[in-house]
Image (cartoon, coloured by chain):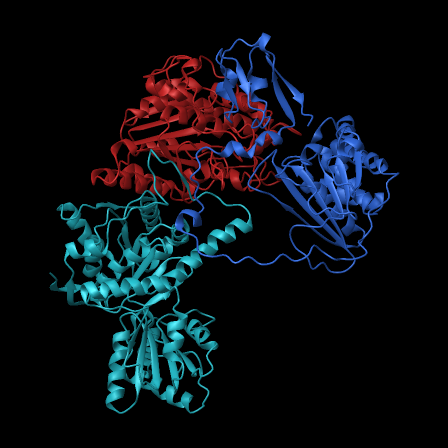
């Protein structure tokens, strides 16, 4: 069996990528299981999707704890404690990261023993479709190649997924071209191999859960206003950057920010809380003097 | 001191709330419970109780208001029955999850469809997994006493769970019998004011309650804590029962036993019809049959150890369920069998369904149960469950089917 | 900085009178660019710090997910159908605890229901009607994103005619998507004669703030329907939330109004309404009305309904055009 785990943020299409892979493998006559898992979080928040591919019936369910292949939609996820895309990776795992950074930089984040593949799919996708919506196509197809399936299988899987969308025919065609380019990107990469042994992490001892008094035993929260500890700033793809010389201190960005991620300093200049700002860019869009610009997040 | 009164079960329930000095009573009428809230409304209108009485727009709203008020730190009483309990069902689990200590009286009434009025226990037993503690009462006296004990239990730091106190519609709700009401001052000593330290809503101490929990591990922790709190009831109830007995002279156990000490044949019953079972036991005893009765009183938590200790070594046991889980049978039967499973000298246990929709259980039907018990003790295999239903009742039903224009064959 | 906090004011005239203190902090799990949160944040500034938000199942259930809360005040999650009944329980409990000397009066809080349109317009209509009928002194904040947002934007009875949702898809037999018109909750609530009733938009923060400040002086039900543009469900880029909030008002699709004891006043009447198309176009949920071919009938129907509404407003109130 091959176990493939996709990590992305809500809206990046990693559920679709896992389904493209699943459909491709199914088309190739293999036994397939795919499923997404969401937290409560939305667009921008980390999510994961799982695809299992085997020749025999699959007697596994739910999360993949020891992946053979991990596909990471952007490198900001690597160090995101809410995503933990590298969890359970070992020397037999391959990690594919969509990034403009070089392998050496990313190697410092990933485990030394895990095989690391890096490519800039974002640029590839933007060049061919002008929208990042097709990142799922690129990553789903490259995963298909990395598990050793043919281009025909990949295109069949993609076709299946595209059929479920409301895309117009020309856009579908663009996606098929993108798929071929993405497939070719992996020409020099050897496919992921099935694990020789299926030994898993040793069993954890069971804990004994004992009675706790009501102040502990209820899902209530006594901390006040502690949500900033979540640091939703890691949802952001683009960051709003203030150019104070253009700012008229009109308060519009402060008033509009849904998140309360913008406060005003003593002189009424806005301060963006980058730990929290989700990057909705309302402030950039609403600023009457264009004092904010949106800049691609580089973490 | 105490004073005797002739009270219906419903009035006894209202007195329980009054003596418990509750702060808040959200209400919604439903037969046969309505008399409880009418009495409380009257007392509130006359200023005889300080509680705020509010008629809500449904049982779902009523239970939400009750739970929310308890979450805000008030002592809350409310009551419902049957369809009403089911209409508010979602809230039972929610309130138990909030771990707030209100008392809800359910007046048992069989469930639709067909819609009917008299008692059986499918309503209250549907709530058995909700997290509420359940106390089932046999007499009007027990209703008022159980409510007072219920508040002590609910508000105990070792428990902190809502409690359902059950009484049967008609056979108890509208039945008057002598009740000794404890003096309010004595109750106040037994039941001090509720001082919440875990759930409150106040400007100086903000807190978030009922927050969503994502992830099975955290959910498992909170959910399992409800179970541990329920288990604590088994010991806490005994402490409270002891204190109640010393103050008021009436002792209530997790289970109630009647002529059980040397009994060979045991009936297991609950609620008001247990009185009829006791009559049958007395009759059999007069005939020289060593019979006894175990009445289920605290049903959640399920006092398995007490039940096993009381039933092991008997010649045969019949569980008379006044309820029916279609496709399974009696609801308490498997729980009792499970309680006995680990016992080496476990008796044969028969499942009997009786009293559905408030149907009477006649002496003849009890005798049929005894006959089965004797056969079972002799090693015979008895069809289970056995429905208590007489030939004449069957004939009468068939006559009605005919009147309804149905093709009844002989 | 000595700007007065907005809660201390009668009415504000400038954005700079909006309270700088935050009562709902960042870090929540709701989507970036959420119009509903934008409105709630502003509402909270006007209502003040001592609050309990009584929540119905919906997107905002995610505001407090264990172990985090964004609130400086309190929170109680109830159910989808009964948040107003929860508010009743809390309000009554606080009243009786104060009356019985069990809670100091200064520790009283404002009770604020927070519910989406799926709850408010549908399942919770009865419980809310009950609370208004009983004259409950509470706030009700409905963030109206015109769908069952938390389950994936399926049709609710607040979904407008012509919007595509996963349960009102577009097909040969259903060209408009949602065939029903949006339920008129404002009028349903107004028929109860609540103390105060208003619609608000996050893009009109002064209007929004003043409505909450005005309501603050009243006892009884204070009900708000907040237009809550939703990038995730309406399918536009998050930065455009303000645009669609503004266009909804300027096309006349979303009327800013209030009703005090049942008497309606429109608080913002544009001199000339922009064509509804400007609001519809660009939102993915309406794309089928424009592509691949224009559905003139549907677009005209939406325009005519808006026109009829405003003709009626002008006729009945004599409001200046």
Q: Quarter-wise, where is residue A40 in the image?
A: top right
Counting from the top left corner in percent of width and height, residue A47 is at: 63, 40
In the image, the chain rendered in red is: C
Q: In front here: C232 or B46?
A: B46
Q: Is residue C204 left or right of residue B243?
A: right
Q: Is residue A189 left or right of residue B197?
A: right
Question: Which residue is located at x 73 percent, y 48 percent?
Answer: A67
In the image, the chain rendered in blue is: A
Q: Looking at the figure, which quarter contains the C terminus of chain B?
A: bottom left
**Is residue B168 visible in this depiction of the protein?**
no
Counting from the top left corner in percent of width and height, residue C21 is at: 43, 22
Q: Is residue C97 above or below residue B216?
A: above
Q: Looking at the figure, which quarter contains the N terminus of chain B?
A: bottom left
Question: Which residue is located at x 68 percent, y 28 percent?
Answer: A299
| Chain B, chosen colour in render | cyan
Q: Is residue B142 above or below residue B77?
A: below
């Amino acid at each position: 069996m091959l176990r493939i785990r996709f990590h992305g943020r809500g809206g990046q299409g990693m559920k679709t990528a896992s389904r493209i892979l699943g459909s491709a493998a199914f088309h190739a006559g293999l036994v397939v299981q795919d499923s997404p898992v969401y937290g409560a979080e939305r667009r921008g928040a980390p999510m994961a999707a799982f695809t299992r591919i085997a020749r025999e019936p699959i007697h596994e369910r739910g999360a993949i704890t020891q992946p053979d292949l991990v596909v990471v939609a952007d490198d900001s996820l690597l160090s995101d404690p809410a995503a933990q895309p590298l969890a359970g990776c070992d020397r037999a795992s391959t990690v594919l990261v969509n990034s403009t950074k070089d392998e050496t930089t990313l190697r410092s984040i990933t485990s030394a023993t895990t095989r690391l593949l890096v490519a800039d799919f974002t640029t590839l996708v933007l060049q061919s479709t002008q929208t990042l919506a097709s990142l799922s196509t690129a990553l789903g197809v490259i995963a298909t190649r990395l598990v050793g399936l043919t281009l025909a299988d990949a295109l069949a899987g993609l076709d299946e997924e595209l059929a479920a969308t409301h895309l117009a025919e020309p856009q579908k065609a663009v996606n098929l071209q993108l798929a071929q380019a993405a497939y070719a990107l992996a020409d020099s990469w050897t496919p992921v191999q099935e694990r020789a042994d299926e030994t898993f992490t040793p069993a954890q001892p069971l804990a004994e859960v004992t009675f706790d008094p009501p102040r502990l035993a209820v899902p209530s929260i006594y901390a006040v206003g502690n949500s900033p500890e979540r640091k939703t700033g890691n949802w952001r793809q683009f960051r709003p950057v203030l150019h104070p010389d253009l700012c008229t201190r009109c308060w519009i960005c402060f008033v509009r920010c849904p998140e309360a991620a913008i406060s005003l300093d003593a002189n009424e200049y806005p301060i963006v809380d980058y730990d929290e700002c989700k990057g909705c860019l309302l402030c950039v869009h609403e600023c009457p003097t264009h004092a904010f610009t949106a800049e691609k997040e580089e973490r | 001191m105490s004073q005797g009164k002739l009270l219906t079960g419903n009035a006894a329930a209202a007195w329980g709330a009054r003596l418990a000095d509750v702060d808040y009573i959200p209400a919604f009428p439903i037969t046969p419970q309505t008399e409880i809230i009418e009495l409380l409304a009257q007392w509130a209108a006359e200023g005889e109780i300080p509680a705020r009485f509010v008629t809500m727009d449904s049982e779902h709203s009523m239970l939400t208001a009750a739970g929310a008020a308890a979450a805000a730190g008030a002592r809350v009483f409310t009551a419902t029955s049957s369809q009403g309990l089911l209409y508010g069902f979602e809230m039972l689990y929610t309130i138990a999850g909030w771990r707030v200590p209100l008392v809800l009286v359910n007046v048992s009434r069989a469930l639709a469809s067909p819609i009917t009025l008299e008692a059986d226990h499918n309503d209250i037993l549907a709530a058995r997994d909700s997290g509420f503690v359940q106390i089932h009462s046999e007499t009007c006296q027990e209703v008022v006493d159980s409510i007072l004990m219920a508040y002590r239990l609910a508000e105990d730091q070792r428990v902190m769970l809502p409690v359902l106190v059950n009484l049967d519609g008609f056979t108890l709700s509208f039945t008057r019998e002598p009740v000794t009401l404890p003096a309010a001052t004595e109750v106040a000593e037994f039941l001090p004011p509720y001082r919440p330290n875990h759930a409150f809503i106040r400007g100086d101490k903000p807190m978030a309650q009922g927050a969503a929990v994502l992830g099975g591990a955290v959910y498992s922790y909170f959910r399992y804590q409800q179970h541990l709190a329920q288990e604590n009831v088994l010991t806490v109830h005994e402490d409270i029962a002891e204190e109640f007995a010393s103050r008021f002279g009436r002792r209530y156990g997790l289970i109630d036993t009647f002529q059980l000490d040397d009994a060979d044949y045991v009936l297991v019953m609950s609620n008001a019809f247990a009185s009829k079972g006791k009559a049958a036991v007395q009759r059999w005893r007069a005939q020289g049959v060593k019979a006894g009765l175990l009445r289920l009183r605290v049903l959640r938590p399920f006092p398995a150890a007490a039940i096993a200790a009381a039933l092991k070594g008997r010649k045969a046991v019949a569980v008379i369920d006044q309820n029916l889980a279609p496709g399974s049978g009696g609801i308490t039967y498997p729980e009792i069998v499970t309680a006995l499973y680990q016992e080496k000298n476990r008796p044969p246990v028969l499942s009997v369904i009786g009293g559905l929709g408030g149907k009477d259980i006649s002496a003849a039907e009890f005798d049929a149960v005894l006959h089965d018990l004797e056969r079972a003790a002799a090693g015979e295999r008895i069809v289970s469950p056995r429905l208590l239903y007489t030939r004449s009742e069957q004939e009468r039903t068939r006559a009605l089917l005919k009147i309804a224009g149905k093709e009844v064959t002989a | 900085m000595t700007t007065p906090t907005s809660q201390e004011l009668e009415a504000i005239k400038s954005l700079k009178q909006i309270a700088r203190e935050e009562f709902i902090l960042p870090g929540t799990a709701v989507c970036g660019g959420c119009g509903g949160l934008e409105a709630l944040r502003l509402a909270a500034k006007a209502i003040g710090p001592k609050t309990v938000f009584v929540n119905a199942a919906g997107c905002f259930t995610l505001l407090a997910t264990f172990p985090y809360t964004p609130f400086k005040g309190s929170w109680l999650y109830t159910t989808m159908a009964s948040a107003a009944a929860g508010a009743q329980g809390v309000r009554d409990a606080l009243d009786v605890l104060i009356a019985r000397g069990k809670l100091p009066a200064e520790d009283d809080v404002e009770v604020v229901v927070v519910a989406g349109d799926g709850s408010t317009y549908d399942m919770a209509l009865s419980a809310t009607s009950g609370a208004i009928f009983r004259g409950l002194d509470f706030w009700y904040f409905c963030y109206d994103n015109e769908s069952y947002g938390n389950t994936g934007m399926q049709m609710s009875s607040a979904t407008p005619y012509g919007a595509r949702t996963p349960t009102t898809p577009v097909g040969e037999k259903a060209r408009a998507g949602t065939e029903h018109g949006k339920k008129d909750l404002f009028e349903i609530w107004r028929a109860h004669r609540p103390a105060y009733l208003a619609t608000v938009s996050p893009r009109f923060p002064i209007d929004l703030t003043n409505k909450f400040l005005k309501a603050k002086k009243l006892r009884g039900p204070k009900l708000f329907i907040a237009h809550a543009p939703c990038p995730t469900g309406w399918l536009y880029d998050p930065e455009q939330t303000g645009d669609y909030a503004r266009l909804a008002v300027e096309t006349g699709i979303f009327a800013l109004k209030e009703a005090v004891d049942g008497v309606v006043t429109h608080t913002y009447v544009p001199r000339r309404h922009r064509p509804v198309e400007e609001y519809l176009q660009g939102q993915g949920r309406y794309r089928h009305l424009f592509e691949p071919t224009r559905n003139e009938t549907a677009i005209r129907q939406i325009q005519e309904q808006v026109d009829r509404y405003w003709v009626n407003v002008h006729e009945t109130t004599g409001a200046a055009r």
